Image (spheres, grey):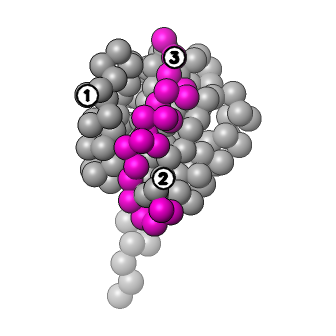
Amino acid sequence: MVGLLIVAHSERLASGVKEFTEQVTRGQVPIVAVGGAVDGSLGISTDAIRQGLRQIASSDGVLVLVDFVSAALSVEAVLEDEPQMRVVISNAPLVEGAYFAAVEASVGATLEETAAAALRGRDLVKVQERWTSHP
């Protein structure tokens, strides 16, 4: 089964997205959350990313969802030392992408299908245009 790695600059943000997606899929999908710097402040730990990837690495692959570009760059740096891992870094919005990816992975989708599902999060319309501005 495809696993999800949630990478955010805040441990609480990453953990919250993990908790949400685990509830949606009833714990059927392997999900690891990595967030914050080593000292607990905002930031990214490449060591934590490496550990997270190793924790859920499988032959089916890992989809990584990130909050900002620097998180994606940190994942890329880790992957330079781990070329054997089958990993896709998603450009999906973090919460919506994690939701769609987790649902897709829970039904046995491939890494490519799971990555495509995550990207559907970019197309969501959360607020109708008539409600976006006030006179």
Q: Choose between 42 and 127: the one closer to the eye.
A: 42
Specify whether 33 is left or right of 90: right
Marked residue nearer the N-terminal end (1 or 2): 2
SS at mark 1?
helix
Residue type highlighted by circle 1: Glu
Q: Name the residue that disc number 1 marks.
A: 80
Specify whether 13 is left or right of 27: left
SS at mark 3?
loop
Q: Name the residue that disc number 3 marks.
A: 58
Specify whether 28 is left or right of 69: right
Residue in the image at 26% along x and 37% along y: 77
Between label 3 and label 1, give the one nearer the viewer.
Answer: 1
Residue 35 circle label:
2
- Does the magenta-highlighted stretch encompass residue 100? no
Instruction: Determine the residue located farthest toward the bottom in the rendered image.
Output: 135
- In the rendered image, residue 40, in percent from the top left (x then y), is placed at 50, 63
Residue type highlighted by circle 2: Gly
Q: Which residues are the magenta region?
A: 39-59
Q: Residues within 10 Å of mark 3 (few under 14, many from 20)?
A: some
Q: Tell me how far mark 3 sits from mark 2, CA to CA.
A: 21 Å
- In the rendered image, residue 93, in percent from the top left (x then y), is placed at 40, 48
